[in-house]
Image (cartoon, grey):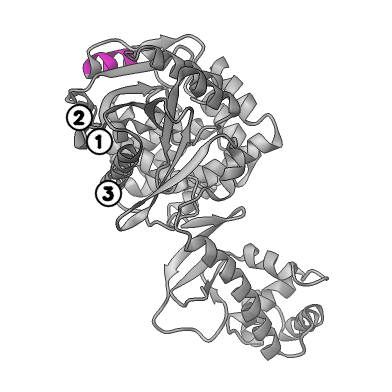
Amino acid sequence: MKQLSGLDALPVIADALDEGHDGLVAFSDKLRSIDELPAFWFKDAPVWVVPRPETLSVWPVQPAGGRKIGFADGGGEVSFVVPVDVWRDEVDGHISARLSDAEFQVFVDLACGLTLDDSATQAEVAVSTRRKQLQGVFRKLGVDSQAGLVGLAAQMTGRLASRLSALHHTNGADFGAYRQYLPKSVRCAALERDGCAPVRYLDMGPVTGRVVMILHPMVFPDITDADVAMFEELGVRAIWPVRPRCLSQSALQSGRWTDHCDHVVDDCATVLEAVAAGPVPVVALVSSGGYATALAHRYPDRVARIDFASTCYSAGRTRTRDGYFGDFLVSALRQNSRMAMVFAQHLTGAVFSTQRLERTFRRIFRGSAADGAVLDEAFGSPEKAARLTYAVRHSIGSMRYDYLGQVHFDWDAARRLVVPKHFWHGAQDCVHDLGDLSRLAEQVSGQPPQVLPQMGHLTEGAPLRDVLRAVVATYSI
């Protein structure tokens, strides 16, 4: 198969993302240098965690390239790398008069150990200009020497490092700031697992109800009081395991998809052992089909049946709609992993702007009235938009694994399972063609998919409740 180069990819990306010239230039530039995905997020900024160098710097700040700086955590174990504007916000929060851009750069340069002459050379200004700017820094920071300036920089980085360390060393047993977006009636729980981070899961509906495990899609859906009320009405105890790197500040490092899948499957089995005495139905939403299949394969005594709802089937080499970025990304991953990784990072740039994120989602799901209604609700208020933005920003690592899963997952593995399998498809799904999905369903389950007329591809809100009601109605008494 022909390898796609950066130039080959640009027309495809332009069609998929409707990018302008600036966006394509940015993508082309990224082909030259790839940054690892951030370990976690601090407010709206990515944070990278790197090993502490053996030779420790005496300076409080280290340049990290690309308008990023690094500084050590309080325990001396690692260094944090953040966009320089994160530290600027920290500095501005402790002084009454904001530093100008030039003054702030002088502050950064001296905190990194540069001389005033070196700082002037880098800025291509006269030393006398830099000295005048330094006097402005002294006045606004309330110090009278370069030694005092460096000492103050150490205090500020120390305070910031303390806050980042608290996030970096979290054990992942809670849901952090995401808890505010969940109804109070949702039970949030975590189970210890030997040698691993605690397994987080949501538990809703009657505790004596029939246990059903639901595997969430790539972007965690908005769970509301209406969803909880539905489970109460149906007598279903819904268990939602939360995958590593999803809704989390966890610093879990990336690895192979197979390792990640094994981790997810063992997490699910741990939860099932705690909440159910026998096998339970598993509903695999959208991109989680690979995890459900692996769970049934490894723990056949835990899974009673699998319902694939609004499934992504790129892994089955079945064609999806042209322009769907996920399908292009899966294709690119098969051909050129370097380019695909850059493309994934380029897409995640949308999360820095809620407006851009909304445009991207609406472009992907254009043509579906059902999906449009879901997006209207998702972006219908500042609180709703903030939830979705948070869910995406804090799940980029998990989303990356979902894309990799579509590359590595083979639908033949699902076909070979002896447990009953069912497919559910939205009639208004403009991403995946019903004819293709029907052929896949026949191959894997031996029966056609159930088609829901009011459902598109997105599974939250009313469409999610519709499909779950339809699934539960088919369960034996």
Report the residue marked by disc 3. 259
Which of pointers 2 and 1 indicates the residue nearer the eye? 1
Report the residue marked by disc 2. 413
The residue shown at (51%, 11%) is: 454
Q: Nearer the viewer, residue 355 or 277?
A: 277
Report the residue marked by disc 1. 294
Residue type marked 1: Ala
Q: Secondary structure under badge 2? A: helix
User: Where does residue 255 sit, x and y in percent of width and height?
Assistant: 32, 53
Q: Estimate how packed mark 1 is, as few (under 14), some (14 to 19) or many (20 or more) residues with alpha carbons within 10 Å.
A: many
Residue type marked 3: Asp
Q: Estimate how packed mark 2 is, as few (under 14), some (14 to 19) or many (20 or more) residues with alpha carbons within 10 Å.
A: few
What separation in Å lies between label 2 and label 1 (alpha carbons)? 8 Å
Q: Earlier in the sequence, mark 1 or mark 3?
A: 3
Is the C-beta separation of discs 2 and 1 under 8 Å? yes
Q: Earlier in the sequence, mark 2 or mark 1?
A: 1
Q: Is residue 183 above or below residue 87?
A: above
What separation in Å lies between label 1 and label 3 (alpha carbons)? 12 Å
Q: Estimate how packed mark 3 is, as few (under 14), some (14 to 19) or many (20 or more) residues with alpha carbons within 10 Å.
A: few
Q: Is residue 364 above or below residue 448?
A: below
Residue 350: image quadrant is top right
- The C terminus, quarter of image: top left
Q: Is residue 68 left or right of residue 431?
A: right
The residue shown at (64%, 67%) is: 87
The residue shown at (44%, 36%) is: 218
Q: Is residue 154 left or right of residue 221?
A: right
Please give the range of residues in magenta: 437-443
Q: Is residue 291 above or below residue 66?
A: above
Q: Secondary structure under badge 1? A: helix
User: Residue 124, can we see it?
Assistant: no
